[in-house]
Amino acid sequence: MKFLRTSGPGGGTLCSPGRGGRPRVVVRVIQVNKALTGAIPSPNIWNAPRTYETENRAADPEGRIEEAMRAVRPWTGAHVLDIGCGTGFHLPRFAVEARWVTGVEPHRGLAGAARRRVRALPNVTVRTGVAQRLPVADASVDVAHARWAYFFGPGCEPGLAELDRVMRRGGVVFVIDNDATRSTFGGWFRRSLPSYDPLAVERFWSGRGFTRRSVDMGWRFESRADFEAVVRIEFPPALAEEIIDGHRGLEVDYAVNVWWREY
């Protein structure tokens, strides 16, 4: 989950597969003063990239977000743009089927980690840039993906204007964000951001031609220590400790919205 910034975490070099076949990585410490002008800070991954990698491994263990995306627009043979790719967690997965994958990340340290992650993949490139000024050519993208990345509703209009420029006719944009109206995680999310208005967010996306697919994905951790560490980077300290004390086990039901639009 990201409240403010650009997408997926991770970093470092690929190692042996993790749980469910997901790659584990060695994550290096990221300096937080390396972001481009216009980047929106994301304290969770910027300050704790190792823990955010743990969160990425725990999120959506059944692959339901990808399943929802494929039902709309598969990316076989496509040019995929991952906006806010962080340390590139999702890039290798897209690269299996895509013709070309471009990751864009505004934080130079994270972008460097993403490049190390995909250096053995000839059909992946990582560029440093922001959603408001995407470093890709006009009408060149078939599938764009932003997962907890910049596109949170009102305020992201400059990024949407860039998508108008870079998307090919028939291309599809996917925006993944939290569903604050349901699930255990949604309840925690609402408590952490009491001013968040999910109806206003829905009106924003619907008014711009996006369609919503509701997805129940979940968190599934390998250890209680992992769960507690992730909760502490995602929520304010007092709420985090309350969540840790009150929630037992290693799994959390977690609902998200997959917003999509064909161009």
Image: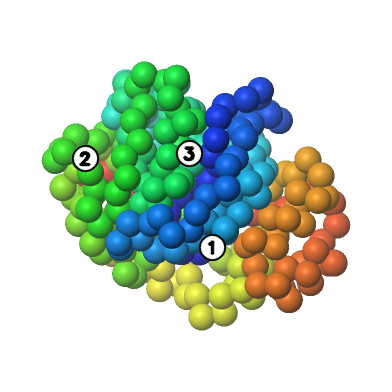
Image vertical order of residue 184 relative to residue 164, above or below: below
Q: Which residue is mark 2?
A: 136
In the image: residue 261, left or right of residue 87: left
Q: Is residue 213 visible?
A: no
Which mark sits nearer the N-terminus, 3 or 1?
1
Cα separation, mark 3 vs mark 1, equals 17 Å
In the image: residue 165, left or right of residue 78: left
Q: Is residue 227 visible?
A: yes
Image vertical order of residue 218 relative to residue 246, above or below: above
Q: Which residue is mark 1?
A: 43
**Which amino acid type is marked by label 3?**
Ala
The image quarter in which residue 76 lies:
top left
Between marks 3 and 2 in the image, the one whose residue lies nearer the viewer: 3
Residue 195: image location, x then y, percent: 51, 80
Residue 121: image location, x then y, percent: 42, 21
**Which amino acid type is marked by label 2?**
Val
Between marks 1 and 2 in the image, the one whose residue lies nearer the viewer: 1
The way the protein has been coloured in the rendering is: rainbow
Q: Secondary structure at mark 1?
A: helix
Q: Residue at x 32, y 45 (%)?
A: 128
In the image: residue 255, left or right of residue 165: right
Alpha-carbon neighbours of circle 1 within 10 Å: few (<14), some, or many (≥20)?
Answer: some
Numbered mark located on residue 96 in the image: none
The image quarter in which residue 77 lies:
top left
Residue 81: image location, x then y, percent: 32, 38
Q: Secondary structure at mark 2?
A: loop
